[in-house]
Image: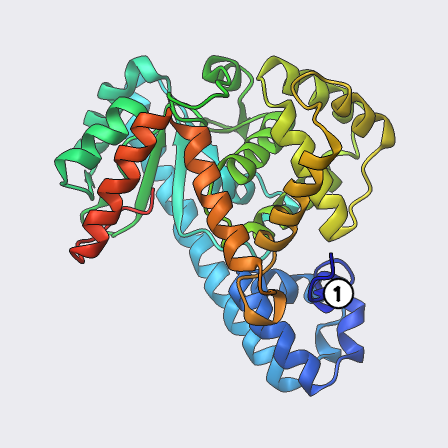
Amino acid sequence: MTLPRIDTLVAALKRPDSLGALGPGAWDLLIRQARQADVLARIGSGAQASGDWDDLPAAPRRHLGSAMALAARQHTELRYEVVEIARALEPMGLPAVLLKGAAYTMAGLDASRGRMVSDVDILVPRQRLAEVESALMMGGWVSMNRDAYDQRYYRTWMHELPPLKHMKRGTVLDVHHAIMPLTARLKPDSGLLLASARPVGDDPRIQVLCPADMVLHSAAHLFHEGDLELGLRGLVDLEALLREFAANPDFWPELLARARALQLEWPLHQALRYVGLLLDAPIPPAVTEALRASPAVRMAPWRQRMMDALFLRALRPAHASASDAWTPTARFVLYLRGHWLRMPPVMLIWHLLRKLVKSMRAEPVDAK
């Protein structure tokens, strides 16, 4: 299997000192791929952190600087928004447990460096979901989707409420009560995730998942969903989390134990495999072997080769220079697979048919 190379992009993400050797053509391709993958600001931030920023040509620096300025503005808005969310939940005695980009940013993790954050995701107990929604509505957040089917779809089967939007600020909030849909084959216990959440700094109202859970949620989100347009950014997040957390010698054993407890060994195995294959991240062989030996992961070699053929295409930037003739097929197959993992066959067929009819009528379709 020969695929277009993305060596320059990977090197830019992992070794900022490699940027100084690029010519105009290489810079043009790098910026196009990085923008499509939503990692342009990450590359610029890496060059600044490594001291290589001043050696970059002026034209690429303008592109990188613009992306970095947008990411910085989003981080500023995010910090304000998180405090407002925590304030809305405080009378209920519930913390704002942040997920994904919001968690990385508020915790000051390396994964937040240059990370675009367009909305906020929080995790709350399912039994208090109605209270949470009422409290947030009082704070100015309202549902963005008025379609009766979509409302029922989210509230009956999904792991989150329909997206909420603040009436004045226009910020988007996703309220999760689980990290997998209720109809999904994998069912990690949200109670375990919430019980191990920890405060950010000295504010107990704002919390994030523990390190192992943060990695597992990122892996589950990336390898259980069907939309991989920003798949490379997801891998970059994972690589940064693993590198930072692995400084603790207890991290890898805790990660394996937590993956078993949350039934997330399979997505963790896939995450570690492709972080290694595409980003050359060092994964301890003992961890890889332990996962391969798990009944939840064990698969025939032909099946893994098939998964590689799909994921190694779909996880690349959605740009013509990083694709081959089979890439659109791989993305479509994984899109269907993501829905297959999320719901039973009859529900899946009905849901996809309804989305098809809505798209043919040119009505707005929710991305979920």
Which residue shows up at 31% across the image and 34% down it?
349
Tell me where residue 104 sits by quadrant. top right
Q: Which residue extends farthest right?
A: 285
Q: 145 left or right of 42?
A: left
Q: Which residue extends farthest front?
A: 302
Quadrant in which the N terminus is drawn: bottom right
Which residue shows up at 39% across the image and 42% down it?
120
Residue 259 in view, yes or no: yes
Location of residue 300 in the rendering, given as x and y in whole percent from the top left corner: 72, 28
Q: 313 left or right of 184?
A: right
Q: 24 left or right of 364?
A: right
Residue sitting nearer the eye, 159 or 41: 159
Location of residue 24 in the rendering, given as x and y in whole percent from the top left corner: 68, 87
Q: Residues within 10 Å of mark 1 (few under 14, many from 20)?
A: few
Which residue shows up at 34% across the image and 37% down it?
174
> In the figure, 258 relative to 44: above or below?
above
> In the figure, 204 relative to 171: above or below?
above
Location of residue 263 in the rendering, given as x and y in whole percent from the top left corner: 58, 17
Residue sitting nearer the eye, 119 or 354: 354
Q: How many marks?
A: 1
Residue 103 in view, yes or no: no
Location of residue 72 in the rendering, given as x and y in whole percent from the top left corner: 49, 60
Q: Which residue is mark 1?
A: 7
Label 1 SS: helix
Q: Amino acid at mark 1?
A: Asp
Q: 66 left or right of 124?
A: right
